[in-house]
């Protein structure tokens, strides 16, 4: 049961970073209400999304996220295969073998999840630094 929950969790490793979308057209709903004379609202996200440097940074962030996803996918496939193989043969193993192999598989899955979390954190940190 623990292995099954870890397998499910391993499938949710990296959250892809979506590029910043352009701001909606100006109007009553663009910034959440009607325009007020003498007040200027600025959306950093809109400026970032519409500037060439912002678009290039968004593309670079997408490439970083794609690379991280690809790297994790190549590691995830054999890990999931090993988890499924363990589940299939678990009934035939002795209690000691099942415990030993289950713990080894769990450690590998936890290491994978830690790596996925670290990659995601790095991408999010890079994104927040770019937006400053």
Image (cartoon, rainbow, N blue to C red):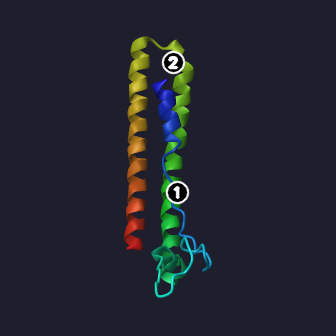
The percent coordinates of residue 40 (x first, y second) are 47, 84
Disc 2 crowd, CA 10 A, few/some/many (<14, 14-19, 20+): some
* Quarter of the image that includes the C terminus: bottom left
In-image side of 18 versus 128 (left or right):
right
| Residue drawn at (44%, 18%) of the image | 98
Q: Evaluate whether residue 79 shows in this view.
A: no
Query: Disc 2 on helix, strand or loop?
Result: helix
Front-most of 6 and 99?
6
Is residue 3 placed above or below 35 in the rendered structure?
A: above
Mark 2 or 1: in front is 1
| Residue drawn at (54%, 23%) of the image | 87
Front-most of 46 and 93?
46
Residue 131: which disc? none
Residue 16: which disc? 1
The residue under label 2 is: 90
Front-most of 68 and 130?
130
């Amino acid at each position: 049961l623990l292995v099954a929950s870890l397998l499910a969790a391993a499938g949710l490793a990296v959250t892809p970073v979506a590029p910043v979308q352009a701001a909606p057209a100006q109007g009553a709903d663009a910034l959440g209400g009607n325009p007020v004379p003498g007040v200027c609202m600025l959306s950093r996200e809109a400026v970032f999304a519409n500037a060439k440097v912002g678009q290039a940074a968004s593309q670079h962030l997408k490439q970083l996220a794609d690379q991280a996803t690809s790297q994790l996918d190549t590691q995830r496939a054999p890990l999931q295969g090993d988890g499924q193989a363990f589940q299939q043969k678990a009934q035939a193993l002795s209690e000691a073998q099942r415990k030993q192999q289950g713990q080894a598989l769990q450690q590998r899955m936890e290491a994978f999840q830690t790596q996925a979390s670290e990659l995601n954190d790095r991408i999010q940190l890079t994104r927040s630094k770019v937006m400053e």
